Image (cartoon, grey):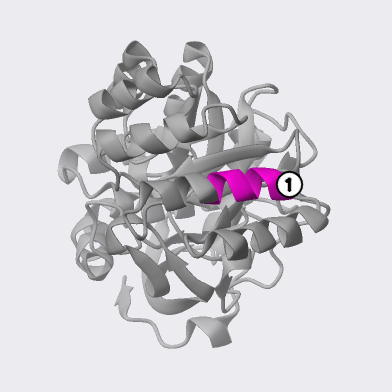
Amino acid sequence: MKISRITLWSVDLTSHETYYMAEGKTCDTVKSHVLCLETDTGLRGWGEVCPIPHYLPAFADGVPSAVQEMAPEVLGIEPFGVDAPMRKLDAFLQGHFHAKSIVDMALWDLFGKATGQPLYALLGGRTQADMPLYHSITCIAPDDMARIAREAYATGIRQFQVKLGADGDWQADAERLTKVREAVGDGPLVYGDWNCGATKLQATRTGRAVAHLDVMLEQPCKTLEDCAAVRQATGLPMKIDEGAFDLASLIRAHELGVLDAVALKLSKFGGLSAMRRARDLTVHLGAEICAECTWGSDIVTAASLHFAASTPQGALLNTCDLSSYVGPRIAPDCTTRKDGRIAPPEGPGLGVTPDPDILGTPILELE
């Protein structure tokens, strides 16, 4: 059994509401790519990657070129084990981790289907029946953000990511955190996320203004060193996102004392193979993990959920149901949230099958 065909689609995903972040970053309609690796026996493995603008050093329209470049190294692979072919790809094409993640994901899906096992079994075994979700709140007026938090709370959500910095007003950011904290009451996790869009001064002023509250900060500044300065000045715990993208960055964040929690994202690290190594190191370093990806629909959500379900007990902070933020749904058989929690799909591999009518006409076909 060998991979004999590569097919790639481009699908536009539209957020249910425009998503505002720091430094003028927005997320409205973005391009997601879906990959199918087909074997000579007809078995199909699926992958997805959606690098939103201004977030990763990645270009969505570069995915087809990268896939075409990697194709000679992918065609002919036997879908039993993923680490070896991905290490070969790393040697063949340096960087381009977002493009590699789509190949890696499809290889893991094939591996699961070829062996008749769900992905979480291959990633270490299922450690939890379902996982807690967080809800990400777009950076708009503080009262509207509080309303969104209350609505999400009513559905069972108990973890809230509060986007900050869209207007560059540190006092407004403090009000956003305060009002969301008040809206959900004591107990739920609330953290403010600047997506690298704050200066040390702005983040420190916001952090000190809410230091009396039970809140966490997420990646206020572009460098880990600046994030560490904010943590030291405010005394608030810190979650790292953009600054964590490989093993060395995880170790550096730990050394600086900012690795209370970390977002492990498939497109940043280059897929499930690299994420699994990052997870083991993160657990060793004592940080809690948000298991997710940058953006996307059902395929990338399914991969994140399998990864989350196999993360050791006590190490998983939360996961994200990316499918619920966008339309259309690429794979209608993907699981959905219930009471603020979500379980991985059942069945071998990822356990999801994309709708061909949604995918439309391929943009790339290679044999």
Residue 196 vs residue 300, the one in the foreground: 196
State the image coordinates of residue 85 (x, y, percent, origin top left). Answer: 34, 40
Q: Image height check: is 357 above or below 302?
A: below
On-image quarter of the C terminus: bottom left
Position in image of residue 110 (x %, y %):
53, 52
Determine which quarter of the picture holds residue 89. Answer: top left
**363 up-or-down from 253: above or below:** below
Taking the magenta stretch, the answer to whether it contains residue 182 is yes
Q: Is residue 8 left or right of residue 71?
A: right
- Horizontal placement of 67 versus 10: left or right? left
The residue under label 1 is 184
The reply to whether the magenta stretch includes residue 335 is no
Kindly identify the amino acid type of the residue bearing the numbered disc 1: Val
Answer with the quarter of the image where residue 178 lies: top right
Total count of labels: 1
The answer to whether one can see residue 223 in this image is yes
Q: Where 100 falls versus 21 (above or below)?
A: above
Local secondary structure at mark 1: helix
By secondary structure, the bulk of the magenta-drawn segment is best described as helix
| Neighbourhood count class around disc 1 (C-alpha, 10 Å): few under 14, some 14–19, many 20 upward | many
Q: Nearer the viewer, residue 85 or 15?
A: 15
Residue drawn at x 52%, y 27% as measured from the top left? 211
In terms of depth relative to the viewer, which is nearer, 139 or 296?
A: 139
Percent across and percent down for residue 345 are: 72, 54
- Image point (37%, 17%), residue name: 232
Residue interval drawn in magenta: 176-184
Quick check: can you spot residue 112? no
Tell me where residue 284 appears, x and y as whole percent: 50, 12
- Residue displayed at 80% across by 38% down: 129
